[in-house]
Amino acid sequence: MRKNMQFTIFILALALFQWWSCSTNPTQSEDKFPFEVKWKIENTLSSFFPPSIGPDGTLYLVSYIQEGDGGKTTLLAISKDGKIKWKYDKRSVLGINTPVIGLNGDIYFTRQGDLLALNSSNGSLKFRFTNPQGSYTATWFPAIGSDGTIYYGSGKYLYALTPEGNMKWKFSAPTRYFAVYGPVIDNSGTIYFGAYDSLMASSESYLYALNPDGSLKWRYTAESRFTSHPALDINANRIYIGTIENGLNAIDLSTGTFLWANSTMYRLRDKEINLYGIAPVVGKDGTIYAIDYFLIAFSPESGKQKWNKSPVKGNSPILTASGHIIVSGGIDLEIYNPQGELVEKITYDGEGGFNTFSNIALGPDGTLYCIIDKTFYAFKTNYGGLAKVPWPQIGFNLARQSNVGLSLQ
């Protein structure tokens, strides 16, 4: 309970600081944008969680909406032409995590340890699965199985639910508190997730591989706490995940065998920590791109750095069909080519700012979505959609289903 309370206070403090900094800063000058603005929605503050995109182009965005001296966490359904279709509101800065779209079109998200499902057509609540252990910690992303099963972690358990919200099984991780990193799913249906004992950097972490029936396939033990959502490369038969002490870890998918680690990654004890971890992504040739203050490209064979670029803080990278890498730089939005050369940059010209460029997503037509200061923008770009690579963004595909067996678009 003490750890849960510390975690809750940590998120609350960050969210309140973000609201204060955004509400007191002047807005961005749009004439300096290098892209055409297709549309925008004002009074939408960052919530740290990236939006998902449905088959019809509808965006599902979590935003902290400012109202007078307070505010509320809101899930917005936004049409591809920028019209708000519906809102799901909670008067709490701890309201809603990243929305994920199910195979039936329902919207799933976690809230304070529980999993909720909304009707995508009108935002009405379909069900709420209440965590029996009463934990306030949960995965930021549920994962969706190829049969529609919903997988999410809460407390020390990973749950498998039917699309209607009935529990199929649960797996108990032998940790005291947290099973929150992942889950992600490979093309055989194996489910991977990370768990750890405490918020201490030196806490051991465990990466689990479960069969679709919930039985244990293997377990890998890391010597310090995980810091990122995992990424899969089924071509190389690997899973990548970051830890505080030992950096980016490469693990064999079949056996759970340790392959390599690069300790320059994820040493975050003296830096700002993104709430859901700066998740790695994997390119066409297997190169891993991740952020630890710098944008770093790693060799898949050895884990050695291929290159690193200027200080970057914020969102996990996005790999585009045009071959570019999109990252948030805190007060910058930066676009690189695979060689690490900067090709485009948007700089926030307001005063101060906190995680200014956030909630970034790329549509199938190359539309770039992000919150800048207090406004959610849709930009027209020539970057195409997501790259057809092993793991192009956190959550894998547009719907954030974290399953390589499902369609990328």
Image: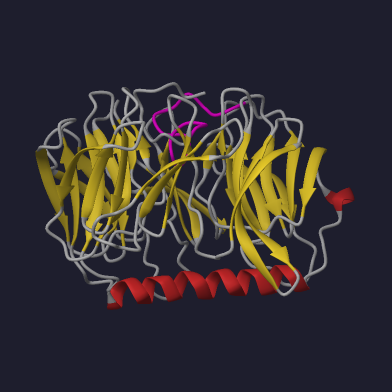
Name the one closer to the observer, 226 or 346: 226
Name the one closer to the observer, 365 or 50: 50
Q: Looking at the picture, how far across and down is residue 339, in whole percent? A: 53, 39
Q: Is residue 300 visible?
A: no
Residue drawn where x is 18% and y is 44% of the image: 170
**Magenta region, residue range:** 385-399
Tell me if residue 384 is in the magenta stretch: no
In the figure, residue 239 lies in which quadrant?
top left
The residue sitting at the right extreme is 31
Say if 295 sits above or below 233 in the image. Answer: below
In the figure, residue 337 lies in which quadrant?
top right
Name the one closer to the observer, 110 or 292: 110
Decide if residue 72 is on the left or right side of residue 214: right
Decide if residue 283 is on the left or right side of residue 139: right
Q: Is residue 215 visible?
A: yes
Say if 381 sits above or below 352 in the image. Answer: above
Q: Main secondary structure of the magenta part?
A: loop
In the figure, residue 273 lies in which quadrant?
bottom left
Say if 330 sits above or below 328 in the image. Answer: below
Q: Looking at the picture, how far across and down is residue 240, in whole percent? A: 30, 44
Say if 384 sits above or below 218 in the image. Answer: above
Q: Looking at the picture, how far across and down is residue 38, in whole percent? A: 81, 35
Decide if residue 271 is on the left or right side of residue 55: left
Q: Looking at the picture, how far across and down is residue 99, in whole percent? A: 50, 43
